[in-house]
Image (cartoon, rainbow, N blue to C red):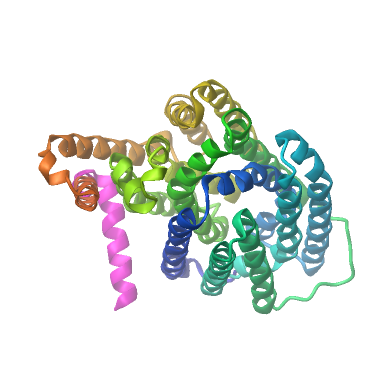
Amino acid sequence: MNAAPGQFGRIALRGGLLTGFSQGIKIAIQFLSVVILARLLMPEDFGLVASVAPIVAFVGLFQNLGLQQAVIQRREISQRQLNQVFWVSGAVGLCCTAIVSALAPAIALFYDDARMTGITLASGAPLFLFSFAALPLALMNRRLQFGQLALNDVMAALAGLIATIAAAYAGMGYWSLVIGPAVSAVVTLAAAWRTARWTPGKPELRIDREILSFGANLTGFNLVNFFARNLDNLLIAKFSGATQLGYYDRAYKLMLFPLQNITQPLSRLMIPILSRIQDDKKRFRDIYMETNWLLAAVTAPGIAALTMTAGEVIGILFGERWLPVAAIFAWLGIASLTQPISATTGWIFICQGRTGTMFRWGVYSSVTTVAAFAIGIGWGAVGVAAAYAISGYVLRIPVLAALLHRVGPVSAWDFLAPQLLFVASALAAWACYLALPQSWLAWNIVAIAIALVLNYGIALVLMLLLPNSRQALLAALNRISAAIH
């Protein structure tokens, strides 16, 4: 992390291009997984594994106690502190795996399905593997080894996809959805240790108090946020059944997982860079805003187009038997229009060491999300998706804007402006789409193509009209052109 200030722009651009390329491949892999597995497996298979996944992942939130981000964020960190982080993470990961194993009979009893015992036991194994990969991955991120991180990600995702499809084709049913993640975890662990070239010392389970406090607040945020984001699966599984959850799970995977495959790796790029310039508030804000404008420009029009043509998209990808997914997919699309930008606000809190504030925001966000789920479950999976979307616009986005304004250096308007522009763009594109002759939209693929052209075209026009977005767009084009030449 010894790059000179003037090098950060080039590092960010190179890292962004590498990350973008790898994420494009991962999104394609995820897309293939969703489409192929929908034809090899039954909705119940997805529902069974999705019923267990939130519980396993909730326990997994403790597997490194936020220490991975602490390693990345700190200006200086000693070999002894790294050794402490490694052994504490490993010990916690082992405990998490043991807890999941102990919970397996209770989970099967809760769902009244004996199959859940084996699914839970198998799903807990990757927790142990990932806990020992946490420190090597953090070191690679801290050293800005974005190319190697990108390569490792692609290798793990591809190995998991191949294993899952092979198992599903062999007739293993829901077990194939457990085997794939386990294979990915093994590949991630092996690749991380091969690249990081770091050797642990004598086991030590004590840790620096400042690092622990940073990680504890971040873990607290992740816990409350995760509980809110996964309660929908539990409620649908309990009150609407595995088939309804299978529909919801496919809609969620198709809409929100690709977004996570963009924002999460982008966080890996931006957090170490913004952490190094956290005291230069103007520069911090400029880099953050330029990144946000470009992120929204790439994702929001595409989300809007898929939302407008939800029925056509589901019909092409999954087939007629999956059409109940369309309404769920559309509501999740409405919710997703603002999510790429909202997801990046964590960079502001983490890079400035404000994880305490981040935790308090997480509590409020989770409470409002849980309340929305409780209201929406009366209308099944569609009601849950609709309640989540509506509550986001009414209860969470305005409050987060006010909180960011207090924390700085990003203002409430900085946060809201991209979202307002792309929501307006989506509404304008939708109005144009509805005004088109129905004969133009008779073919599903043509309807989707028209929706994409309308959304990206109108969004581009609006971006060029607004000074801030126009500057961000031109600055990015100049940097890319300079890097090429």
381 left or right, relative to 193? left
Q: Give coordinates of residue 38: x percent, y percent.
A: 47, 53
Horizontally, residue 272 falls left or right of residue 394, namely right
Q: How many marks?
A: 0
Picture quarter with the C terminus: bottom left
- In which quadrant of the rendered view does residue 272 lie? bottom right
Can residue 352 be seen in this snapshot? no
Q: Main secondary structure of the magenta part?
A: helix
How far across and how far down the image is residue 162, in percent? Answer: 54, 69
> Which of 162 and 406 lies nearest the eye of the viewer?
162
The residue located at (32%, 35%) in the rendering is 420
Residue 367's spot in the image, x, y percent? 60, 26
- Is 170 part of what is drawn in magenta? no
Residue 396 vs 264, above or below: the answer is: above
Q: From the viewer's side, name the closer residue of 82 and 362.
A: 362
Question: In this view, which residue lies farthest toward the front?
Answer: 171
- Residue stretch rendered in magenta on the structure: 460-485
Q: Residue at x 70, y 75 (%)?
A: 193
Quadrant assignment, res 144: bottom right
| Near-viewer residue (242 or 149) | 242
On screen, residue 118 versus residue 187, left or right, reads right
State the image coordinates of residue 400 (x, y, percent, origin top left). 50, 32
**Residue 443 visible (yes or no):** yes
Q: Residue at x 89, y 66 (%)?
A: 203
Which quadrant is home to the N terminus? bottom right
Residue 298 versus residue 28 in the image, above or below: above
Q: Is residue 474 magenta?
A: yes
Classify residue 170 by image quadrant.
Answer: bottom right
Front residue of this view, candidates 142 and 112: 112
